[in-house]
């Protein structure tokens, strides 16, 4: 299979309040060709339109995205969110919760989590944590080529959160989703902030 990788040189986005840095990539395979593109918003890339907005709240940061299939056929598109909290402190630990879909990052000074939602029951969401090392970045680049992420449930040391939204579109369908990031000084504060933010956003997405 021939593969074409089309990556822009967009800058990493930064939330100055929560130190929440992120990059977003789109991945598509059509006509036996794979393409991936780093993006903020894109219009009419492979006949997809995507709008991404960041909302900075007192509880954290919310990245909302809307993707529209502009063709009159069923199609598939993957969105990859690469997130770096740049959390200070030693004894860092990142893990995927075994009893929920949350991704946690703990350190000696800060606690953070990543939550997500998409209004498409036929899509698949995968998650992993990557070491913030040369080897981890290499595996991330391989992810862009294959369109899949390896399952890493637990990691010690500085780490990135990776989310993969594997979206299946009906003709002319529009899908919405969001990624929620929260940071706090204790586990209890983190749980309370997450609960409060989830209640505020309960009806945010249109079904």
Image: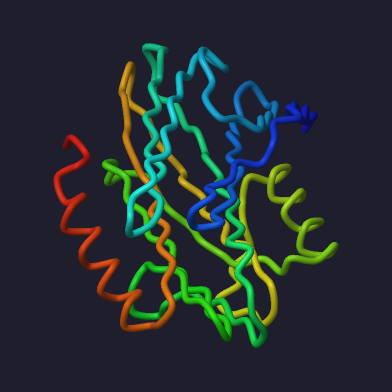
Q: Quadrant of the N terminus?
A: top right
Q: How is the image coloured?
A: rainbow
- How many tags in the picture? 0
Q: Quadrant of residue 75?
A: top left
Residue 198, placed above or below residue 174: below
Q: Nearer the viewer, residue 3 or 116?
A: 116
Residue 198, placed above or below residue 32: below
Q: Position of residue 182 (x, y in %)?
A: 40, 63
Q: Position of residue 124 (x, y in %)?
A: 41, 50
Q: Position of residue 93 (x, y in %)?
A: 59, 82
Q: Quadrant of the C terminus?
A: top left
Q: Residue at x 69, y 79 (%)?
A: 157
Q: Nearer the viewer, residue 193 or 151?
A: 193
Q: Position of residue 112 (x, y in %)?
A: 46, 70
Q: Residue at x 42, y 58 (%)?
A: 181
Residue 43, placed above or below residue 98: above
Q: Residue at x 76, y 63 (%)?
A: 136
Q: Residue at x 37, y 12 (%)?
A: 72
Q: Nearer the viewer, residue 154 or 124?
A: 154
């Amino acid at each position: 299979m021939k593969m074409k990788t089309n990556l822009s040189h967009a800058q990493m986005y930064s939330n100055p309040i929560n130190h929440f840095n992120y990059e977003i990539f789109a991945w598509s395979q059509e006509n036996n060709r794979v393409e991936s593109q780093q993006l903020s918003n894109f219009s009419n890339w492979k006949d997809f339109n995507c709008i991404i907005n960041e909302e900075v709240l007192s509880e954290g940061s919310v990245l909302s995205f809307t993707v529209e299939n502009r063709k009159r056929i069923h199609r598939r598109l993957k969105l990859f969110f690469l997130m770096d909290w740049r959390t200070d402190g030693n004894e860092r630990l990142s893990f995927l919760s075994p009893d929920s879909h949350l991704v946690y990052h703990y350190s000696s000074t800060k606690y953070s989590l990543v939550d997500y939602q998409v209004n498409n029951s036929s899509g698949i969401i995968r998650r992993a944590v990557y070491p913030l090392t040369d080897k981890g970045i290499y595996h991330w680049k391989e992810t862009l080529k294959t369109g899949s992420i390896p399952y890493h449930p637990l990691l010690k040391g500085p780490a990135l959160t990776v989310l993969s939204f594997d979206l299946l579109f009906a003709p002319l369908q529009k899908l919405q989703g969001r990624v929620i990031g929260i940071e706090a000084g204790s586990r209890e504060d983190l749980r309370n902030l997450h609960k409060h933010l989830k209640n505020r956003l309960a009806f945010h997405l249109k079904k």
